[in-house]
Image (spheres, helix red, strand yellow):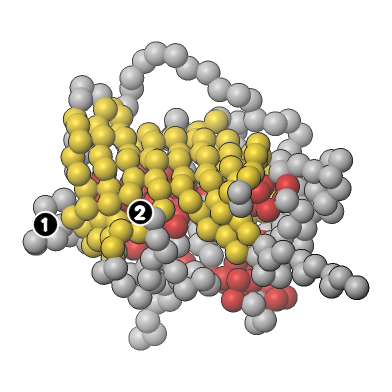
Amino acid sequence: MAQKTVTPLEHLVKVLELGEPSQYRSHTYVNGESLYFPTGRVYGGQVIAQSVMAASKTVPSGRLPHSIHGYFIAAGDIRQDVLFDVELLRDGRSFSARRVNATQAEGPILTAITSFQEKGQTGVEYADPMPENVPDPESLTSAKELMEPFADKSPFANYYARKSPFDIRHVTSTVMLGSDQTSTDPAHRSGRQMVWMRTDGTVDVSQTMNRAILALGCDQIMMEPIVRRSGLSFMTPGISYATIDHSMWWYRDIDVSEWHLYVQDTPTAAHGRGLATAKVYSRDGELVAAMAQEAMVRVPKAPQASQQ
């Protein structure tokens, strides 16, 4: 009998589930395998999502993740295990706080604070509305289709065409393949963009896992507003980039197999660091999550002309 092929989404869920607690240290969970990413490094969104899952194993039943604030310390080696050491900071009447340190043999790669909240708490409630007249995702071209013609020539294109567990569809023009021509004009330069995203397939998982998958997925597009407003693309020769820190807040339940609209922008960049923000809406217009990320984006300086 032929062995069943594991889809990228099924593999993602397996990686996020983590293993049993370490027999040597309580509240320490081991990632025995990392997701493939073309850089050869451990994907930052994966470590954020696994930190959420590791911390969730230590909180009282009924509490869901409502925020995480992570700082990336070093690039992870995709060939090594990652240890997630969870420190129990506080269990209050409705909130639980945890610190998670993700480490490999050479030392820490991420430290994060994550918080969980009991469902059903009452108080203030409001939300910005979703933008009007946004094209339906079905009318837009998937990044998988955009990247397929280049998949045999570029590991980056191959990943998004054939290995990504997400279906990504840009409302604004994508900066995956080239710069936004409007953004190259200093008079109109803007990092504002909108992107539809869902998982490529469906899977029956907990609400905590849904929120962790959203944390992983958003990292695939969070840097784009910075690249867009800078008049660059991910194909710009010599460009280098890395996430520095990442903050995320969940406000309502999520089903990652359904379409979500990311409304993104970037207010500032300096010293090779840019700040990107996003509001995440369900298809029916609910604001379900918000996030902010700072990233390093660098490009080589053009050589100066020799003086005569």
Q: Residue at x 80, y 67 (%)?
A: 304
What residue type is disc 2 on?
Answer: Leu
Q: Which residue is mark 2?
A: 110
Instruction: State which mark lies toward you, 1 or 2.
Output: 2
| Horizontal and vertical percent position of residue 228 | 72, 51
Q: Residue furthest front?
A: 308
Quarter of the figure with residue 147: bottom right
For the point 45% across and 55% down, the residue is 45
Q: In the image, residue 112 lies at what x, y percent?
A: 34, 45
- Residue at the spot of label 1: 25
Q: Secondary structure at mark 1?
A: loop
Q: On the rendered image, what quadrant is the C terminus found in?
A: bottom right
Q: Earlier in the sequence, mark 1 or mark 2?
A: 1
Residue found at x 14% / y 60%: 22
Single out the residue that lies furthest toward the left. Answer: 24
Q: Residue drawn at (52%, 35%), measured in percent from left and top?
A: 290
Q: Dot 2, how many residues are within 10 Å of its Cα: few (below 14), some (14-19), or many (20+)?
A: many
Quarter that holds the N terminus:
bottom left
Residue 182 point in image, percent of width and height: 84, 48
Query: Does residue 228 appear in the picture of this structure?
Result: yes
Give the structural element (helix, strand or loop) at label 2: strand
Say which amino acid is labelled 1.
Arg
Mark 1–mark 2 Cα distance, whole angstroms, equals 18 Å
Q: Nearer the viewer, residue 303 or 297?
A: 303
Q: Is residue 95 left or right of residue 210?
A: left
Task: Please identify the quarter of the rendering in which residue 286 is found.
Answer: top right
Q: Is residue 43 above or below residue 6?
A: above
In this view, 23 is above or below 94: below
